[in-house]
Image (tube, rainbow, N blue to C red):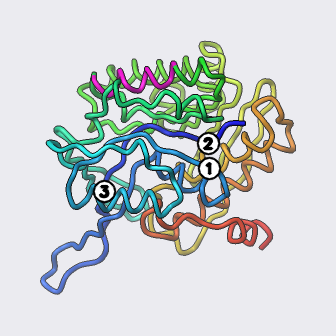
């Protein structure tokens, strides 16, 4: 029996999200704990799963804030390192009229990209049912080597490997470099969570099904999860395809963490049924639950600290 349901490796940072205007007319920003991998783990912890994080923050005010937030969320932080030299990574998030976001990163360098191969906790990964990662931990050589080492350990130990490209173009030297790292993730995962704009970017296909067909022709990925924002979501599982409409909210304020919440809820069902245990009904059940949870998070600022409970998700589904 493994001690951790899900271990994730990657970025942990401060998302400065807009929060009104000062009396002098200047924008006010709130320092929210963020980073896709820990958002995923926070939702899974809320669903009762044992989770652990591997990553690095700066030994500074924001690093201490993040360590506290991770621990408060019930995530094991024994492999969260604090860098003496490099500061915690920061992101400024500008939210447009429809809740869509534009990111500016302060990460040249940032502590999250300083994780080394030597700091990868092999035993912790071997003790995990699912290992989850994205591409932000593959933008630079050192942390890329650490990520690949972790993926190799997860594969050897028989863990289910989950991958979310989470493409952030400003963080890459070139989008070709990003494409190469996404290819690595696609070649090594059992569960892929990908967004509508990412599938179009990667395959060049406007039609999502056509794009997924290209991916499935090149990579053997048992479960592909496609998030489509206001259009809902789809799951592609071996020969099956399921689609579920979204739960649209009148009081949506931003979409930060919605994709992470969706992905986490899908991993909850992978833990529940096993990667070999899905049929059409279970896929639809998974997408309904995940869409509802993601919908709730769009009504709240930040993500990591405000994940919805099972009761809140079920209440929305049954409304």
**Secondary structure predominantly adopted by residues drawn in magenta:** helix
| Front residue of this view, candidates 309 and 293 | 309
Quadrant of the snapshot with the C terminus = bottom right
Residue 272 at x, y = what percent?
Answer: 78, 44
Q: Mark 3 highlights which residue?
A: 14
* Cα–Cα span, label 2 and label 3: 26 Å
Query: Neighbour class for label 1 at 10 Å: few (<14), some, many (≥20)?
Result: some
Q: Earlier in the sequence, mark 2 or mark 1?
A: 2
Q: Identify the residue shown where x is 75% and y is 30%.
A: 237
Q: Report the residue marked by disc 2.
A: 4
Q: In this view, does 251 lie to the left or right of 278?
A: left
Q: Horizontal placement of 168 versus 88: left or right?
A: right
Which residue lies at the image location 57% right of the left edge and 53% below the top edge? 261
Question: Mark 1 and mark 3: span between their CA atoms?
Answer: 24 Å
Relative vertical location of residue 90 with respect to residue 222 in this rendering, above or below? below
Residue 143 magenta-highlighted: yes
Q: Give the range drawn in magenta.
A: 142-152
Expressed as whole percent of the image width and height from the top left, the position of residue 226 reads 62, 39
């Amino acid at each position: 029996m493994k001690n951790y349901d899900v271990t994730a490796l990657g970025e942990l940072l401060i998302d400065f999200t807009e929060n009104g205007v000062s009396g002098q007319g200047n924008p006010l920003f709130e320092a929210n704990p963020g980073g896709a991998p820990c958002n995923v783990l926070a939702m899974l912890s809320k669903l009762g799963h044992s989770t652990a994080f591997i990553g690095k923050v700066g030994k500074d005010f924001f690093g201490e804030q993040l360590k506290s937030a991770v621990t408060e969320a019930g995530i094991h932080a024994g492999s969260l390192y604090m860098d003496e030299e490099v500061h915690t990574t920061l992101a400024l998030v500008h939210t447009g009229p429809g809740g869509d976001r534009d990111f500016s990163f302060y990460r040249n360098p940032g502590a999250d990209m300083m994780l080394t191969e030597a700091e990868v906790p092999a035993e912790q990964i071997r003790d995990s049912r699912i290992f989850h990662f994205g591409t932000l931990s593959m933008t630079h050589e050192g942390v890329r080597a650490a990520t690949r080492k972790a993926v190799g350990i997860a594969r050897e130990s028989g863990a289910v490997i989950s991958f979310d490209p989470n493409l952030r173009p400003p963080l890459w030297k070139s989008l070709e470099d990003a494409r190469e790292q996404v290819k690595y993730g696609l070649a090594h995962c059992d569960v892929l969570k990908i967004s509508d704009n990412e599938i179009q970017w990667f395959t060049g296909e406007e039609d999502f099904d056509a794009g997924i067909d290209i991916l499935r022709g090149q990579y053997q990925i048992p479960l592909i999860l496609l998030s489509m924002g206001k259009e809902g979501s789809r799951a592609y599982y071996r020969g099956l395809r399921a689609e579920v409409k979204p739960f649209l909210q009148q009081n949506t304020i931003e979409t930060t963490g919605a994709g992470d919440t969706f992905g986490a809820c899908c991993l909850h069902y992978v833990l529940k049924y096993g990667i070999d245990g899905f049929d059409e009904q279970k896929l639809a059940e998974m997408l309904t639950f995940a869409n509802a949870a993601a919908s709730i998070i769009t009504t709240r600022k930040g993500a990591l600290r405000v994940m919805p409970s099972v009761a809140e998700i079920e209440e929305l589904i049954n409304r």
